[in-house]
Amino acid sequence: NERSVSLLQLLGDPAPKQVTVEYGPDQNPVYEFGPNVNTGQLARAYFKSPFFRDFSLLFTIKPMSSKSGVLFAITDASQTVIYVGVKLSEVQGGSQNVVFYYTEPGSQQTNEAARFRVKSLTNKWVKIALAVEGDVVTFYLDCELQGSVSFERSPDEMEIDPSSGVFVALAGGADPDNFLVSAFSVIE
């Protein structure tokens, strides 16, 4: 599908040396991201500009730590602002948040568009889906609808700068929290 981007595309083949490739129970590859992984690439190599108005982010993950960490991010050229991204917050009191970022280009700081509270996902295989349609983001956990949140965004298209970055398991310099995870992911 020309509108999908897989984790393997974003990582490259072979994957960076800080990413270990194993095979899961269903014989599909499982990518384990270590603490010093660098998966940054130019976003425009994978995503058109303007970026999709409506899109979905799909992740099958097994977080290996209760610490916070970025799952996916498209950043500005200087890697200081996350345009589109997803992060798991640190586990506190047995719960954590799935945070969705959507920031208009030209903004000086990352905008948190929505957050969804879930029980701790640490050491569990889970499927996370975030579907953005218009000004609403809808969150699914293990294919079950968890909720929807309206967020504010411009009617203008989101232009991706030629030097913008795309990252898996981190956000470049835009967020210091690398994600320790076993993962497989597709973006549509």
Image: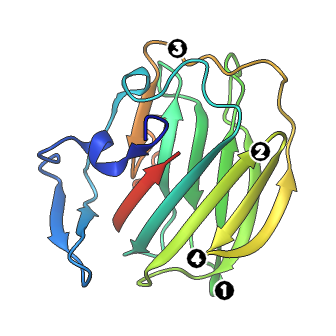
Does 57 appear above or below 51?
below
Earlier along the polypeptide chain: callout 2 or callout 1?
Answer: 1
Q: Which quadrant would residue 43 be assigned to in this image? A: top left
Instruction: State if disc 1 and disc 2 touch (CB < 8 Å).
Output: no
Disc 4, SS: loop
User: What x and y, as percent, mark residue 167?
Assistant: 40, 40
x 56%, y 51%: residue: 57
Q: Earlier in the sequence, mark 3 or mark 1?
A: 1
Under mark 3, the amino acid is: Asp
Asked whether residue 118 appears in the rendered view, the answer is: yes
127 versus 154 height, above or below? below
Secondary structure beneath label 3: loop
Q: Which residue is mark 2?
A: 133
Q: Nearer the viewer, mark 2 or mark 1?
A: 2
* Residue placed most toward the observer, 160 or 78: 160
Residue 4 position, x and y percent, is 46, 42
Which residue corresponds to the image point at 16% horizontal and 70% vertical from the top-left? Answer: 22
Q: Which residue is mark 3?
A: 161
For the question of whether residue 179 can be seen, the reply is no
Which residue sits at x=24%, y=85%? 25
Please state which of the two labelled residues, at mark 4 or mark 3, is closer to the viewer.
3
Mark in front: 3 vs 1 = 3
Which label is found at residue 122? Answer: none
| Residue wearing tag 1 | 93
Query: Label 4: which residue?
Result: 91
Q: Which mark is first along the chain, 3 or 4?
A: 4
* Label 2 vs label 4, nearer the camera: 2
Q: Are marks 4 and 3 in contact (CB under 8 Å)?
A: no
At mark 1, the secondary structure is loop
The amino acid pointed to by label 1 is Gly
Q: At 52% from the left edge and 14% from the top edge, which residue is drawn?
A: 161
